[in-house]
Amino acid sequence: MRYYKPIEIAKELEISTSALRHYESWGVVPLPERAKNGYRLYTKVHLAYFRCLRAMIPGFGFTLTYDVLRHIQNADMDHAFWLVNVEQAKLHEEKSNADQTLVLLQDPKLTTIKDKKIKNLMTIGEVAGITNVQTSAIRHWEKEGLLFPERAPENGYRLYTPVHVRQILLICNLRKTVYYLEKMKELVQAVEHHSIEKIKEVTENALISIHRRNRQQFNGVHKLMELCIEVGLMGYNEASLLKPNHSFDMEKDK
């Protein structure tokens, strides 16, 4: 059996050997056997775990990646796959929202959203229903200085306009992207001043980030499948689908 030195794996993955030890201590890779001198004896299985780990983290994050690999160690492949599937579904929803936001922000009229009519003045409950955002989140953004709703003179209730709807949509689109509060304020104010080009640029950049994460996720899934084959969780027929088939009949293809 071929054994790998920690420095060999660390060099390939461009991490430190101490990082390998941390992954072991966190239980996300199987514990290796030890040589008589105490050195770790990493195998092809360990290499597959480490490759999968490093490939999944950029697209899925540390917590989910660790959870998935622990399920693989317990031979619970289906549970691991469904965890990944849920995360991919979330990213797809994020992209759909960004696509929709880009369209809505550039609509000068913005009279409806998903067949929900936008009025000139709306309550916080109405705005929450239209944008699919919790009222608590809208109030929080107001405290952060991102939103400035009007107030009804007779009772002081918050009143929101179509501009506020645009601002809420933009905040929803950007909150999962790394933006400082002051930068967010600048962008939200751009909606108020109808700076469409600035808003379009920001939303398109958010989409670029989503596309990048999508590619990272597929790379992680690819390594996860390789790991499942290496540890014997994939049946013969399932594993064969992932490998090139060179046994087809050339005569039939003529």
Image (tube, rainbow, N blue to C red):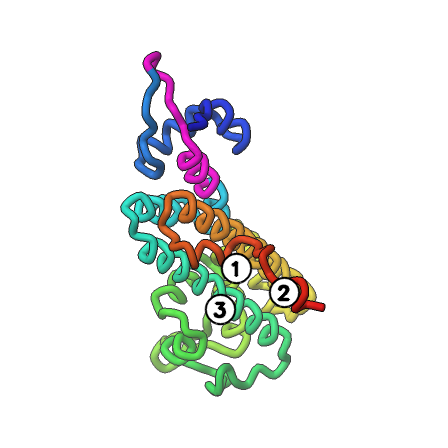
Image quadrant where residue 235 sits = bottom left
Nearer-the-camera pick, 163 or 7 = 7
Q: Residues within 10 Å of mark 2 (few under 14, many from 20)?
A: many
Horizontal and vertical percent for residue 116? 46, 85
Q: Which residue is mark 3?
A: 168
Q: Is residue 26 above or below residue 125?
A: above
User: Where's the C terminus, which quadrant?
Assistant: bottom right
Cα separation, mark 3 vs mark 2, equals 13 Å
Residue type at numbered disc 2: Ile
Cα separation, mark 2 vs mark 1, equals 11 Å
Q: Which residue is mark 1?
A: 174
Horizontal and vertical percent for residue 70? 31, 44
Image quadrant where residue 66 sits = top left
| Mark 2 or mark 1, earlier in chain | 1
Residue type at numbered disc 3: Ile
Q: Residues within 10 Å of mark 1 (few under 14, many from 20)?
A: some
The segment highlighted magenta reads 36-53
* Residue found 31% across the figure and 31% down from its top: 31
Horizontal and vertical percent for residue 48? 45, 39
Q: Residues within 10 Å of mark 3 (few under 14, many from 20)?
A: many
Residue type at numbered disc 1: Leu
Q: Secondary structure at mark 3?
A: helix
Q: Which residue is mark 2?
A: 199
* Residue found 37% across the figure and 33% down from its top: 23
| Mark 3 or mark 1, earlier in chain | 3
